[in-house]
Amino acid sequence: MKVFIVANPRKPDVKPALDQWLPWLKQRAEVVGVDTDCCSDLAAVDADVILALGGDGTLLGAARRLNGRAIPLMGVNFGRLGYLAGFSPKHFRSDFEALVAGRLKSTSRLVLEASLLAADDKADAFDSAQVARARKTVATALNDAVITAGPPFHMIELEIQAGSESGAVRFFGDGVIAATPSGSTAYNLSAGGPIIDPGVEAFCVTPVCPHSLSFRPVVVSSRNSLVLRASKVNPGTTLFCDGQETAVLRGGDRVVIRRSPNDVQLIENPQAGPWRTLAEKLNWAASPRYNDGNG
């Protein structure tokens, strides 16, 4: 097995662990490279698996740099939550042995593709070929694509159109989140969006502080394209993909969000299924805490 390692040195425990594990790893697999700058072009890597040592951000960065390559990612969590990076340093050696023995499976995770069309561009936003020719910028996201109001932080006006239906819905607020099932437990959850099982082929549209009592998150099929038109924006209104600044939006610009043709392959920890992870990491379904009657 050929292994490429992405290690995030900003996590204080990563370097000591890497120094300790590397000789052991080389006895069990062919280590074809180690990236500690988190900037290598992973699309050019010849490996069977990419080991991401850090946290969810490290794994998301590695997924972005794969540029569509279907190399499975195994994330070892040295951060706080570790929702996507599902393996712990404590059990890493036994988990890696299981990987080499073929006992760990990977699953496909849906990825969003966000394309920016300039305000004066007349391309049909629901024609993928026209969008590919006309777009100024394109980025992918394993978690979410987010439009934020930005400085000076006045409310912005967006128009949303899903599928090829005629007409668009207009709303005012601080922005909007388009989240994948993988990203439904991230910013989407904090903004009041639903948790979506990773196997569901859909994404969620969640408004950020909408100036409305009735604008609720909507789950839409990943077969549909979503078009967001920036009707009224701030100088700092920005599109972010997986937390990375992608483009500053001007009035009339359109962001076309659709499913990327390339999924990300994520190696799953069989000891950390979706339900168990929700309970352990997000305290989902936790029982109320009662006092002992003395206070």
Image: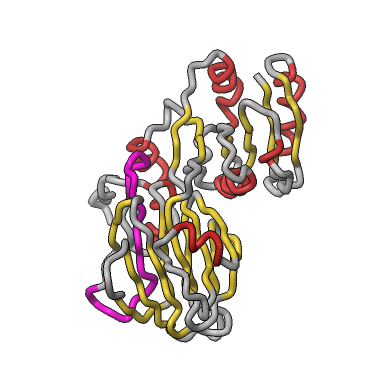
**Predominant secondary structure in magenta?**
loop
Tell whether 294 sits left or right of 6: left
Q: Quadrant of the N terminus?
A: top right
Q: Which residues lie in the magenta part?
A: 195-214
Which one is in front, 251 or 25?
251
Q: Is 203 contained in the magenta span?
A: yes
Q: Residue at x 44, y 60 (%)?
A: 257
Q: Point out residue 218 in the picture as x, y percentages from the top left corner.
A: 28, 61
Up-down: is 95 above or below 164? above
Up-down: is 192 above or below 88? below
Q: Point out residue 196 in the picture as x, y percentages from the top left corner.
A: 32, 48
Q: Residue at x 34, y 76 (%)?
A: 210
Residue 189 placement: quadrant: bottom left
Q: Residue at x 53, y 59 (%)?
A: 132
Q: Quadrant of the C terminus?
A: bottom left
Q: Residue at x 54, y 64 (%)?
A: 240
Q: Is 158 contained in the magenta span?
A: no
Which one is in front, 58 or 177?
177
Answer yes or no: is residue 1 visible. yes
Q: Point out residue 127 in the picture as x, y percentages from the top left corner.
A: 42, 61
Tell whether 181 sits left or right of 56: left
Count of residue discs: 0
Residue 133 placement: quadrant: bottom right
Q: Point out residue 112 in the picture as x, y percentages from the top left corner.
A: 46, 53
- State the scheme by which the image is colored: secondary structure
Answer yes or no: is residue 79 visible. no
